[in-house]
Image (cartoon, helix red, strand yellow):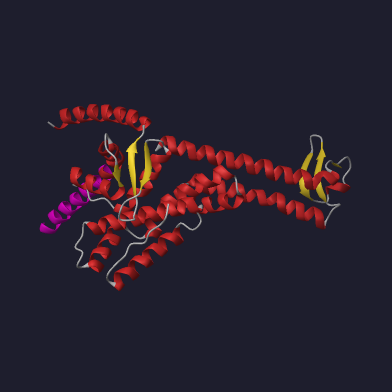
Amino acid sequence: MKIAQIKFNQPAAARVYNDYMKRVKKVTSSLPKESQDDIYMEMNSHIFEAIQHKDKLNEIDSLLDILEKLGPPEEVLKPLVADKKLEQATKTFNPVHVFKALALNITNGISYIIFAILYLFLFGFVILIIAKIVYPSEVGLYYKPNTLFVLGMGTVTKENGVHEYLGNWFIPAMVLAIAVFYILLTALLKLKKNLNKNKS
Amino acid sequence: MLCILLYIYLMNETFVTNWKSQVKKGTLTFIILNILKGHEYYGYELIEQIKQHTDMDIAEGTLYPLMNRLKTENLVDSKWVEQETGIPRKYYCLTPVGIKTLAQMNAYWKNLESSIHKIIK
């Protein structure tokens, strides 16, 4: 659907309108194009319909009054953008969307902070991969029955009876662990989102 | 003495204002669903209907995130309708799930209303 702009007779009103709609675009810029257009058109429609019910002679005053009642886009659209971003993130499993969705929802409850921390733990595996490349003989999965279990770096290799189990499979195993934990966490995030839906 | 009375009066006023605001917030979804019963309204029209029926002065921008939530919960549906003016309107209506849910909400509300009526008489 084509997005039409509202026409104003007073240049000042046109400037205020353009500025407001630019802010709407900026606030929604992290969403898919379809959602961005949907929100833009809805705000546009609201302003247009409200103007039809106002004094046409005093365009700028009417517009300012409408925009004041509508509220700043950064505030009123925040929950809408956060909801839509979370929906997109849990649908696509895209890490960039997941990161942005968590950033937008971080103030919506302690659970989102916990999720953010758990996602940060995934970077631990990335650090292990880098460490393995730099210190190949000192990083691995060390295990001695009933006494020791180490996933990482250490001097345990020299101790008696301690074996490193993964060898050259360490990096592929860490990549697999990242993928598995990422999918698991995102599935849990999706479950949490659906639980919220049923609760509200 | 006058100061104390004024303080108590103001405290009461604040309490009642906060309580009213909580009631409004808690019943807005219920009101919207009832207004949409048997009707299709676009955003601005829906706000006007809320004001007309309830004398409630809602923050207009907050309606749209709420409508999106009702839509993801499958209680309402929406469609864009082209207009001669060139600015399309997004019309909202109840879904079959919304109609069923509203019937349950209305039954609960009637029960609550009758209980409260007995208490406050």
- Look at the picture and state if B99 lies above or below A131: above
- Look at the picture and state if B94 lies above or below A28: above
Q: Quadrant of residue A151?
A: top right
Magenta span includes B111 = no
Q: Is residue B110 left or right of residue A4?
A: left
Q: Which residue is at the far front?
A: B84
Query: Where residue A190 sits: x, y (%)?
Result: 53, 40
The residue located at (34%, 56%) in the rendering is: B86
Query: Where residue A30 sits: x, y (%)?
Result: 51, 56
Say whether residue A77 is visible.
Answer: no
Query: Where residue A199 sits: x, y (%)?
Result: 41, 36
A123 or B61: nearer the eye? B61
B48 or A125: nearer the eye? B48
Magenta span includes B18 = yes
Say whether residue A55 is visible.
Answer: yes
Q: Is residue B52 left or right of residue A9?
A: left
Magenta-colored span: B1-23
Count of residue discs: 0
Q: Which residue is at the far bottom?
A: A11
Q: Which residue is at the far left?
A: B2
- Look at the picture and state if A157 lies above or below B6: above
The residue located at (62%, 51%) in the rendering is: A120
Q: Quadrant of residue A19?
A: bottom left
- Magenta-colored segment: predominant secondary structure: helix
- Look at the picture and state if B20 lies above or below A11: above
Q: Is residue A66 left or right of residue A139?
A: left
The residue located at (56%, 49%) in the rendering is: A98
Query: Where residue B90 sits: x, y (%)?
Result: 35, 47
